[in-house]
């Protein structure tokens, strides 16, 4: 059986467990991968920072490309098809991590959580893996939502609404695929005229792709007296971030919404399965025995306070805001942006974890709605 040579983005987690048994594994910084590195490489595994097209692959030996991301706007799939190069992405791998990022943004930002539970509404743009999971999580929590996705049949999108209705919601959160395809391109979906209609006391969250919002128009909008709160995880000119735009955001982070340890491992395992199928190999058996630690609430809090505490105890979104601010003060801020992603801490997801305490039925319901398990604190 021939040896498969694999070149992978060094930011991927669980590579050794998933791929070492398949052949020779080499890693590199995603932004530094060049055509010269691929002369004798069979499998190229990337993340969103590597542009995969003719300029990179021409003359290479690559037979399969995998991206450990849900989106694949950085991959020229037409070129891959024309040259009989296999392809796989990791749709849904980071969906829960992004959903929990959105919940953390809402919980950390002013009184938006209280407003939602007092009859407010979340508007979801994009009903793919992230948008649909967010909708289900909100429904479990008893929060009203509407969703817009013109690429899907309206009867397949629960609570479907027109874009204008979605953008009028208390919280507007963006999760579309980045595309320039007609008739519904998402690049600059929110330009000056649409941004003008989003105002205080609304909250605007973008954890999809930076160019979904016109960055210059957004900066001008946020300078206005009636501007909404804004949380950005993605930026139009990554890895460069406009410090003035960051300063106007309630929270700004370094494209890490989906960067939980759980999501990274999940994506790597999905690509390993796809690579094995392409080359006719048996998929490797992965054993992730590391369990996320239990969470403790102590004295039973009021349900809304308990919800906020669980979300923010599991994920400190304010720390990521602070770290990006420090990076933007560095001499080479675009390099610091990439370092924040490369060296990102092992953040564990909330869903699936055990929460210990003595809970009222209402608080237990909140815990279960988050996908967690409630248990009595050991005596």
Image: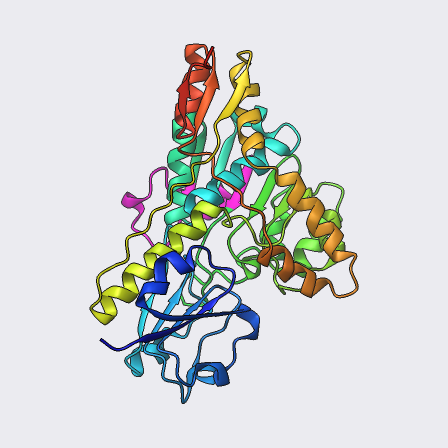
Asked if the magenta segment contains residue 150, the reply would be: yes
Quadrant the N terminus occupies: bottom left
Q: Is residue 168 visible?
A: no
Q: Is residue 220 left or right of residue 166?
A: right
From the top left corner, tell me how far across and down residue 165 is, in percent: 48, 41
Whether 202 is drawn above or below 360: the answer is: below
State the residue at coordinates (44%, 23%): 367
For this rendering, which residue is in front, 28 or 254? 28
Q: Looking at the image, is 45 positioned above or below residue 85? A: above
Left or right of residue 145, residue 341 in this image: right
Q: Position of residue 199 (x, y in %)?
A: 65, 41
Give the residues drawn in magenta, as a range: 147-173
Q: How many marks?
A: 0
- Report whether residue 224 is seen: yes
Q: Position of residue 293 (x, y in %)?
A: 48, 32
Q: Residue 296, relative to residue 335: is it above or below?
A: above
> Which residue appears at 39% of the width and 84% of the height?
40
Instruction: Report the front residue among 11 and 108.
Output: 11
Residue 343: image quadrant is: bottom right
* Color encoding of the figure: rainbow
Asked if the magenta segment contains residue 92, the reply would be no
Q: Position of residue 3 (x, y in %)?
A: 30, 76
């Amino acid at each position: 059986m021939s040896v498969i040579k694999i070149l992978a983005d060094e930011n991927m987690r669980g590579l050794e467990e998933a791929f070492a048994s398949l052949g020779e594994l080499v890693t590199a910084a995603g932004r530094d991968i060049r055509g010269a590195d691929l002369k004798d490489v069979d499998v190229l595994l990337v993340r969103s920072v590597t542009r995969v097209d003719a300029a990179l692959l021409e003359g290479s030996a690559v037979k399969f490309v995998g991206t450990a991301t849900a989106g694949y706007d950085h991959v020229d799939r037409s070129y891959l098809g024309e040259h009989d190069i296999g392809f796989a992405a990791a749709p849904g791998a980071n969906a829960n991590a992004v959903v929990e990022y959105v919940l953390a943004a809402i919980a950390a930002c002013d009184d938006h959580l209280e407003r939602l539970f007092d009859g407010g509404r979340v508007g979801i743009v994009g009903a793919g893996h992230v948008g649909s999971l967010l909708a289900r999580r909100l429904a479990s929590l008893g929060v009203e939502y509407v969703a817009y996705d013109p690429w899907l049949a309206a009867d397949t999108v629960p609570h479907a609404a027109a874009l204008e209705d979605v953008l009028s919601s208390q919280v507007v959160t963006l999760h579309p695929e980045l595309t320039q395809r007609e008739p519904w391109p998402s690049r600059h979906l929110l330009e000056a005229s649409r941004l003008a209609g989003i105002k205080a006391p609304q909250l605007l969250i973008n954890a999809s792709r930076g160019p979904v919002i016109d960055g210059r128009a957004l900066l001008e909008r946020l300078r206005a007296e009636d501007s909404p709160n804004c949380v950005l995880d993605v930026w139009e000119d990554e890895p460069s971030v406009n410090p003035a735009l960051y300063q106007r955001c309630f929270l700004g982070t370094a494209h890490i919404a989906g960067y939980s340890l759980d999501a990274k491992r999940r994506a790597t395992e999905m690509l390993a399965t796809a690579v094995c199928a392409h080359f006719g190999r048996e998929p490797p058996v992965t054993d992730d025995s590391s369990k996320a630690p239990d969470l403790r609430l102590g004295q039973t809090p009021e349900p809304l306070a308990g919800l906020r505490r669980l979300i923010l105890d599991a994920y400190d979104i304010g720390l990521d805001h602070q770290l990006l601010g420090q990076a933007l003060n560095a001499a080479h801020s675009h390099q610091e942006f990439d370092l924040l992603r490369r060296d990102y801490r092992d953040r564990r997801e909330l869903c699936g974890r055990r929460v210990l305490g003595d809970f009222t039925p209402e608080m237990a319901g909140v815990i279960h709605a988050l996908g967690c398990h409630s248990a009595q604190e050991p005596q």
